[in-house]
Image (cartoon, rainbow, N blue to C red):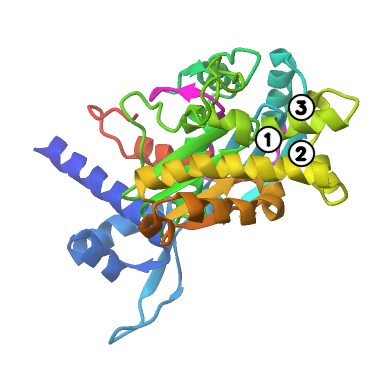
Amino acid sequence: MASYQFEIKQQNKLMILKHIYRYEPISRADLAKQLNLTKATVSNLVDELMREAYLYQIGLGVSSGGRRPLMLKINEKAGFTISVDIGVNYIRSILTDMKGNIFVKQTKVINTNDYTLTLQHIDQVIQSFTEQTNESPFGLIGIGFGVPGLVDQHGVIKSTPNLDWQLPDLKDRYENLFHVPVIVENEANAGAFGEKSFGEGKEANHFIYISGGIGIGVGLIFDGVLYRGRDGFTGELGHTVIRMDGLTCSCGKKGCWERYASELYILKEYETFKEESWQTLRLEDAVADAAQNPEIAAIFERAAKHFAIGLTNIINSFNPEKIIIGNRLTQAEHLMRPIIRATVQEMAITPIAEKVDIHFNNTDQLSTVLGLSAFSIEHFFDRQFKVSNSPVS
């Protein structure tokens, strides 16, 4: 009986903590009403959570009659997360508090296939970030990695077709190096979760995040929840075919959407105007040159039309309320957005296309790393309040 009561108490504390995390600032009375708990239960558990450094009280809220209530918030200074987005031609890293507020961010351009050098850089970044954290009750609560490829529900990397080297077991490597829990996620899934937790998708229940980089990844939010599929391999829509017997994709197949609509397509076309390989070219330079050269601007027009074909298929298939486009293609928004919108309106089923909001994310391409931070925070909460016979995924 005592064990059952303890389990219920832990579940209620976790439920309260996650609800405050999402809806703060919030009063005890609103917590009790929204979670269907008694006021006494909420008051007692909130007091415990405050003593344990998870929460704190701020000023008075708006009264609905009677005294103004004290409002509750997550103690954002109680711990820190480190998140690393491993792209094909970049590594993006952030250090955040328990609410996803960024203290340090760093982006490094990479054009090497030597994974040992890449891992050395990641090691240095994480070590540097850990040295920049302030003293806190929980310290570093987790490290998250986003990778462009197939990642199963256990964080095992199954395939990374756009990388020329096989990623090692990041989870084991970095848990052994830094002695904190590590999560590994598909970068587009993490991007979708980042938008749901902190960004443009926070108030949306049905939206799709599209990560436009060297490849194209897709994260699906249905009914407010990240959809993973049976094995965690959803979102590989960049490999849907838009042209039979078309150009060969990194996956080995032909005619994939991402081969015609991604940064890779743009750089390979841009390469014909330059005396260097696409691997050393930068999207930023292509965007700048497009303002002066109509032929280079036409590259972006073709990419935008191809992008709209895949986007139309997604819109017709899933009927989302919002499409959020993130990652490096956001730098070309002014060149691509008008063409994408016009082409989608022309090609998509009218009642669906009329209602969908197509939005380019302009928050420094941080959707994925912020999603990794949110994953680390949620996993931390789950670990703190699990019971012995309830494993945390």
Disc 1 crowd, CA 10 A, few/some/many (<14, 14-19, 20+) = many
Q: In the drawing, does residue 65 fall left or right of residue 195?
A: left
Image quadrant occupied by the C terminus: top left
Q: Amino acid at mark 1?
A: Glu
Residue 391 horizontal/vertical position (percent) = 29, 27
Q: Amino acid at mark 2?
A: Leu
Q: Is residue 390 visible?
A: yes
Q: In the drawing, does residue 162 fall left or right of residue 293?
A: left
The residue wearing badge 2 is 283
Decide whether residue 209 is among the magenta residues.
no
The residue wearing badge 3 is 110
Which secondary structure lies at badge 3?
loop
> In whole angstroms, how far apart are the C-alphas of marks 1 and 3?
15 Å
N-term mark: 1 or 3: 3
The part of the image, by quadrant, that contains residue 162 is: top right
Magenta range is 128-154
Furthest-left residue in this view: 1
Residue 325 horizontal/vertical position (percent) = 56, 47
Which secondary structure lies at badge 2?
helix
Q: Which mark is residue 380?
A: none
Disc 3 crowd, CA 10 A, few/some/many (<14, 14-19, 20+) = some
